[in-house]
């Protein structure tokens, strides 16, 4: 069921909210764009809901190069460079590369764990299966705790029934939180906003990771059916699928990462996570976050209109089983 807030009103409210929550983490001299701004400017930060963590606008996702076999040297360079440039949220999952992503990240966390809010996920819906995954996750990540443990890719009523069952994954999450192995609980999904809305009405999760890009409004819009509810609940909101693995880009449509990121960051999100292919892509995304200014509602609508003819490609993840 859609939130009663109309889309125009919500976007207007979102623009106001974005203007109110971004803060610079520290002062410093402004960099000329003839210099290397990525090395001299700080990223703005926003509150990650009620967790108390001031998260940078850009966060590092554990997919792409980081989940690919045989990319250890390149992956470690990306992770270390991200932290060097101020990234303070790293997201991964037990399923990414069947543990490869966690393993690469763990080799950096062994030395730099205190610098980031570290999040991983369980794709298992059962109590026992999730605990087994968590044991592997902690070993791979070379840490004794997670800042967030999240339910991965929740997209159906069957998922919810199994997760919330007496022997479901949520019981494992609560147990680990009570033992201080986990600090916060999260839920993620990119297929059906109505399912995630049901979940967060049923349980007070701390954070939510949802698909939010300029093609969203054309099918099962997260911006209309889920985002207002998450804002109302004061959750930490993380946007994903911003470039849709490159499928958001098309001649006559969205053509730059700046357009893609500014669209999502104008919404009332805490941060966005993006998987990285190369160091150059990492630094480009950080430069965009450093210089971010919100779009006007007319500019938001124009970017949405640009994706109308190819939204199925740019929202491919909503059509998956």
Image (tube, rainbow, N blue to C red):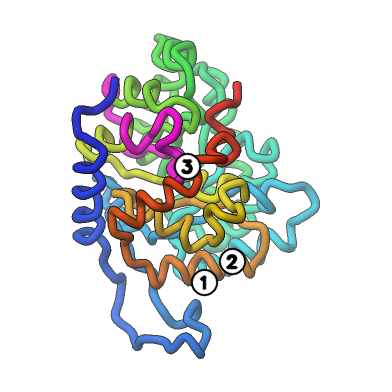
Decide: marks 1, 2 in contact (CB < 8 A)? yes
Which residue is denoted by mark 1 in the rendering?
A: 84
Image location of residue 22, percent across then percent down:
27, 63
Which residue is denoted by mark 2 in the rendering?
A: 80
Q: CA distance from mark 3 to mark 2?
A: 32 Å
Does the rendering let one see residue 145? no
Decide: marks 1, 3 in contact (CB < 8 A)? no
Residue at x-position 62% and y-position 50%: 246
Classify residue 212 by image quadrant: top left
Label 2 residue SS: helix
Most foreground residue, 69 or 196: 196
Q: Earlier in the sequence, mark 1 or mark 3?
A: 1
Residues drawn in magenta: 201-225
Which residue is denoted by mark 3 in the rendering?
A: 215
Image location of residue 154, percent across then percent down:
47, 25
Does the rendering let one see residue 118? yes
């Amino acid at each position: 069921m859609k939130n009663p807030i109309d889309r125009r009103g919500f976007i207007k409210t979102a623009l106001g909210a974005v203007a109110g929550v971004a803060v610079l983490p520290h002062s410093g001299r402004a960099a000329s764009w003839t210099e290397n701004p990525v090395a001299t400017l700080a990223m703005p930060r926003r509150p990650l809901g009620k967790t108390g963590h001031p998260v940078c606008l850009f966060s590092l996702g554990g997919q792409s190069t980081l989940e690919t076999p045989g990319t250890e040297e390149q992956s470690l360079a990306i992770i270390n460079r991200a932290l060097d440039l101020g990234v303070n949220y790293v997201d991964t999952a037990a399923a990414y590369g069947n543990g490869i992503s966690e393993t690469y990240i763990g080799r950096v966390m062994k030395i730099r764990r205190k610098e980031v809010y570290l999040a991983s996920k369980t794709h298992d819906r059962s109590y026992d299966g999730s605990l087994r995954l968590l044991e592997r996750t902690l070993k791979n990540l070379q840490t004794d705790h997670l800042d967030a443990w999240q339910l991965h890719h929740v997209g159906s009523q069957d998922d919810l029934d199994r997760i919330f069952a007496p022997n479901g994954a949520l019981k494992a999450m609560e147990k680990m939180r009570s033992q201080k192995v986990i600090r916060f609980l999260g839920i993620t999904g990119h297929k059906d906003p109505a399912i995630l809305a049901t979940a967060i009405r049923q349980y007070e999760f701390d954070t939510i990771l949802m698909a939010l890009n300029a093609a969203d409004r054309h099918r099962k819009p997260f911006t209309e059916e889920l985002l207002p509810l998450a804002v109302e609940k004061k959750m930490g909101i993380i946007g994903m699928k911003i470039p849709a693995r490159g499928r958001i880009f098309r001649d006559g449509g969205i053509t730059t990462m700046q357009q893609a990121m500014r669209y999502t960051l104008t919404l009332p999100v805490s941060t966005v996570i993006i998987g990285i292919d190369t160091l150059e892509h990492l630094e480009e995304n950080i430069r965009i976050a450093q210089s971010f200014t919100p779009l006007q509602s007319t500019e938001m609508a124009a970017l949405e209109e640009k994706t109308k003819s190819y939204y199925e490609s740019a929202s491919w993840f909503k059509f998956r089983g």
